[in-house]
Amino acid sequence: MTRDIIATDKAPGAVGPYSQAIRGDHLVFTAGQIPLDPATGILVEGSIEDQTRRVLDNVRAVLEAAGTGLGSVVKMTVFMTDLGDFKRMNAIYAGYFPEAPPARSAVQVSALPLGADIEMEAVALIESP
């Protein structure tokens, strides 16, 4: 079984001892992505909609670096500091997965890295390692 570390400058670099993603044979597992602007490394301020877009764009960039994309995601996990924002997050999320959305879990947490309001991680299929 192969195990490849995935890294791209089109998504924020790791802020700790972890990889942006790991690709193994036919799956890729992303690290959690928070709404950091990959160009500046600064947390995106603004609405939960703005933060959700940035997170999903970051997830997409990591998946593309691994040779796959959002259309191949089989499982998403969403971490939010306020599930009161769930409906607003979900409206943006739905636009990134218009057909056959992946399985998903969403949980409220007390805090996220760098004071982010949202974080997402993905598991996606990949055709070839």
Image: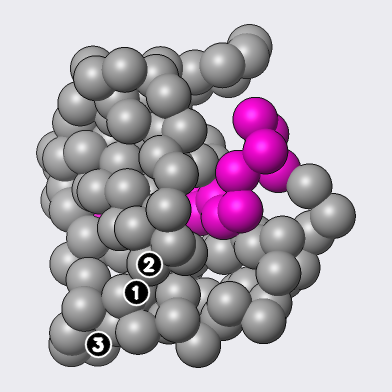
Is 17 situated left or right of 69 in this image? right
Task: First in sequence, mark 2 or 1: give its number.
Answer: 2
Is residue 88 visible to the viewer in this orientation of the structure? yes
Q: Give amino acid for label 3.
A: Ala
Q: Position of residue 90 (x, y in %)?
A: 43, 82
Q: Which residue is mark 3?
A: 100
Q: CA distance from mark 2 to mark 3?
A: 22 Å
Foreground mark, 2 or 1, reads 2
The magenta segment is 112-126
Secondary structure under tag 2 reads helix
Task: First in sequence, mark 2 or 3: give its number.
Answer: 2
Q: Residue at x 34, y 74 (%)?
A: 93
Q: Residue at x 64, y 60 (%)?
A: 79
Q: Give amino acid for label 2.
A: Glu
Secondary structure under tag 3 reads loop
Is residue 24 visible to the viewer in this orientation of the structure? no
Q: Quadrant of the N terminus?
A: top left
- Mark seen at residue 49: 2
Secondary structure under tag 1 reads helix
Q: Residues within 10 Å of mark 1 (few under 14, many from 20)?
A: some
User: Mark 2 and 3 residues: CB-CB less than 8 Å, in contact?
Assistant: no
State yes or no: residue 121 in magenta: yes
Q: Position of residue 12 (x, y in %)?
A: 37, 24
Task: First in sequence, mark 3 or 1: give its number.
Answer: 1
Q: Nearer the viewer, residue 35 or 19?
A: 35
- Mark seen at residue 93: 1
Is 11 situated left or right of 49 in this image? left
Q: Give amino acid for label 1.
A: Tyr
Q: Residue furthest top?
A: 17
Q: Residues within 10 Å of mark 3 (few under 14, many from 20)?
A: few
Foreground mark, 2 or 3, reads 2
Q: Residue at x 79, y 59 (%)?
A: 109
